[in-house]
Image (tube, grey):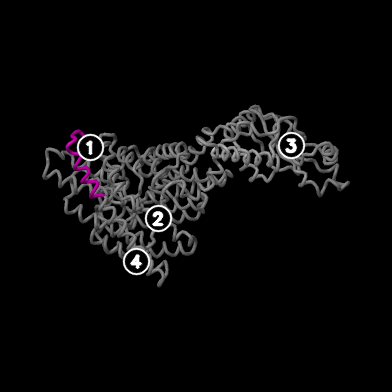
Amino acid sequence: MRNPLSPIFREAGWIYNNVHEARWLILGVGSGVLSGAAAILFFLGIESGKHLLLNQFAGVVLPAPVGETLFAGASHGAAHRPWLIPVMTTAVGMLTGFLVSRFIPDSVDSGTDGTDATIKAFHQKGGNIPPAVPLIKGLTSILTIASGGSAGREGPITQIGAGIGSWLAHKLHLSARERRILLLAGAAGGLGAIFRAPMGGALTAIEVIYREDFESEAVLPAVLSSVVAYSMITLAFGHEPILSAPAFRFHDPLELPFYVLLALACSLAGWFYIRTFYFIKYSLFARLRAKVGLMWTMAAGGLCMGLLGMQFPEVLTGGYGWLEMAVHGNLAVLTMLLIIFGKTIATSVTLGSGMSGGMFAPALFVGGMTGGVVGFVSNQFFPNVVTQPGGYVLVGMAAFFAGVANAPIGPLFMVCELAQGYGLLAPLMLASAVCLVLNRNISLYENQVHNKFDSPAHAEDATINVLENLRVENVYKPGTVVTLEESTTLKALADIIKGTRDFYFPVRAADGHVSGILSIGDVRQWIFDDHMLDLVVVKEVARKPATLHLKDDLYTALMLFIDTGLGQIPVVDAEGEIVGSLGREAMFRAYSDYLEKIRADQAEPA
């Protein structure tokens, strides 16, 4: 009995394969669902781990922002044992070193953090991330942050989401180009969910891979993935933003010079932040690793981090609670200054030794504290102009990250989403632009490239651009194509091929759709065996189906030729009827003719 849903599934399959926007709609939503689920588990793991290790074991009570009150107030009765912090961070360092060196040694030199590793996978590895990498990095990041390591969760969840996108692309047998786009969509989903900022997460994911560019093709799936993942995490943990902030509004143009001063301070702090990190990573821990190995190097990093955190708890974990206190004016200027230096050193020790975690949150933390120093000092001297010093904390977060990561748009939207409005948009844009110019020669991420022209991922774009301008309908050979029924025997096939010069034949199922492609080369061993002629039918030896549509471009055709190994592919119309065929020779001839036309046009005098 014929399945009544078959036409629906067939129509859905046609839409998926032929409508570009619908295809990325489905893939973006799918990656968002998986990334959102991963973000929920990741966030729950970190918060549960912090509650158990820091609160219950060490008896350390850290301020929690309004959006992270999962275990707020549940640990005030625990005994105060801060000496456990270096014990835990050292143990986590040793475990991380063992797991990384044992199972994913290639990830050691992947860059600054999970975001940098994702950037490297996009540019240099065809969008491939081995599944073991995000699994192990995710687990060790949870342990690092939960034990007090100065690291953020945004970097690891970016890598986890990117790994999900890469895995999904492999399962769906997507091309390398599509795999890279889906990698960014997964990263956007993870980042948008964990930061509770869907637009900021999507834009950051597609712009952070370049210094002066962004991946425009990934906008649609990245936005969809980020929105879906954000929706999932808010369903699980509520709609509150991470930080509670007053409705700041910029209203006095006389305040703009103070925001320029903020940008100058953030640029200087950003330079110090990056230089300190690279010095500790390469001048100290890289040399130590060469002598004692990865595990003991990470153990040393964990020990240093633990000792620092034991004496200065403000530098432990991500630190969003302290940021919220700064926004509301509950931190002294001297305390914020000390936190800037302490957090920079703590993060450099934690991640510079190789322990897992992200640089994103610590960068926002340092930027926010820098903005707080400028805002509250300016408020003391010019209270009639700088009336909202807490807003400088939010502006400092975006401006600082724009300068050190060369990503001005995403963090700007993140801060607007955090502030629940666009009241600070003008100073945000001004401060971010100044930081971007002043810090143009430094970068937080080692694998960033300037633009698409410098990316190995786009090395083939010159060829792709030509092929994308040519359509199958202008190149294919129209006419009747010899088509075989699935039940055609090899004996009947021998009679059919006598009257044609073709070497590839579409195979048609009973309902009329193309179910396979038969290559004469595949049946040569049987076609001259009299005993097999009546026993074997073409359905049993045909390859998987492959068709092109009239509106397809020749780049799509090239990828299909490469994937299938065929020399000729049938062309179908909108109803799925075969109207002709396209051969490899015709495609390459059209490509060559197009290049000749371009050369001739360029050679003509103006």
Amino acid identity at mark 1: Pro
Classify 10 Å Cα crowding around label 4: few (below 14), some (14-19), many (20 and above). few
Res. 283 mark: 4
Give the residue number, with chain letter if any, for mark 1.
Answer: 246
Q: Position of residue 416 (x, y in %)?
A: 30, 37
Q: Which mark is residue 446?
A: 2
Taking 172 as reference, is 46 above or below it?
A: below
Q: Position of residue 137 (x, y in %)?
A: 43, 55
Q: Is residue 57 visible?
A: no
Q: Categorize mark 1 by other alpha carbons within 10 Å: few (<14), some (14-19), many (20+).
A: few
Are the two marked residues, 1 and 4, in contact with CB atoms closer than 8 angstroms?
A: no
Real-space CA distance between mark 2 and mark 3, rounded to the nearest whole angstrom: 51 Å
How many marks overall? 4
Left/right placement of residue 571 relative to residue 227 reads right
Per the image, label 1 sits on a secondary structure element best described as loop
Tell me the distance, in whole angstroms, between the alpha carbons under discs 4 and 2.
16 Å
Question: Label 3 amino acid?
Answer: Val
- Look at the image and say whether residue 517 sits in the magenta stretch: no
How far across and how far down the image is residue 252, in percent?
Answer: 18, 34
Q: Residue furthest right?
A: 530
- Which one is earlier in the sequence, the residue at label 1 or at label 2? 1
Mark 2 residue crowding within 10 angstroms, few (<14) / some (14–19) / many (20+): some
Give the residues drawn in magenta, as a range. 246-266
Q: Is residue 333 left or right of residue 413?
A: left
Per the model, the C-alpha gap separating discs 1 and 4 is 43 Å
First-in-chain label (1 vs 3): 1
Using the image, tell me which numbered label, if any, was put on residue 507. 3
Q: Of discs 1 and 2, which sits in the foreground?
A: 2
Q: Dominant secondary structure of the magenta stretch?
A: helix
